[in-house]
Image (cartoon, rainbow, N blue to C red):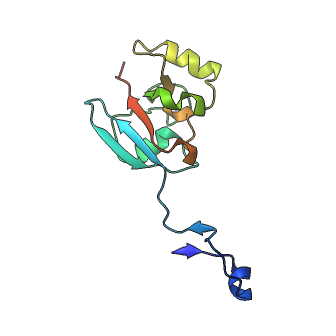
Amino acid sequence: MPFYRAADVASGVARAEPICQLGAPMAKLIVTGLQGNDTVLDGKTGMSVMENIRQSGNDELLALCGGAMSCATCHVYVDPCFADLLPPMSPTENELLDFSEHRQASSRLSCQIPFEDSLDGLKVTIAPDE
């Protein structure tokens, strides 16, 4: 159902397009699990990628510290197509990833990636446990 400004409705002004569409599709987050299976999630903005994955019921991403950036158990590989859209890696995130024997060029901590609509289609792969 389209949503129009109340003032436009009250004044009888016809609008060519609604200002937003209720029920519009959400940005998608694609998660590849440890066995290679893909799951497509409706990503929620205002949450990290880690929070989106954990709230979906996926228990392959351990995230033991709950996003406090103290354990690196939310390690993922980010599709390189999205690398330039992500915030830069902090020195602390970099140090934590240095302890992983599975670190790759596309490694990130999913707790440090805020999910936004601009990341629609973001694909991450859960890194193996240490």
Residue 105 position (above or below residue 112): above
Figure quadrant of residue 103:
top left
Residue 47 position (above or below residue 97): below
Residue appearing at x 52%, y 34% in the figure: 111
Q: Nearer the viewer, residue 41 or 52?
A: 41
Residue appearing at x 44%, y 15% in the figure: 100
Does any portion of residue 6 appear in the rendered image? yes
125 lies left or right of 94: left
Residue appearing at x 50%, y 63% in the figure: 24
Residue 49 position (above or below residue 87): below
Residue 1 picture location, percent across and down: 51, 75
Residue 38 picture location, percent across and down: 31, 39
Residue appearing at x 57%, y 18% in the figure: 94
Q: Nearer the viewer, residue 82 or 56?
A: 82
Residue 96 position (above or below residue 52): above
Q: Say which quadrant the C terminus sits in.
A: top left
Figure quadrant of residue 101:
top left
- Kindly give the residue lying farthest to the front in the view shown: 16
Residue 5 picture location, percent across and down: 69, 76
Does any portion of residue 116 appear in the rendered image? no
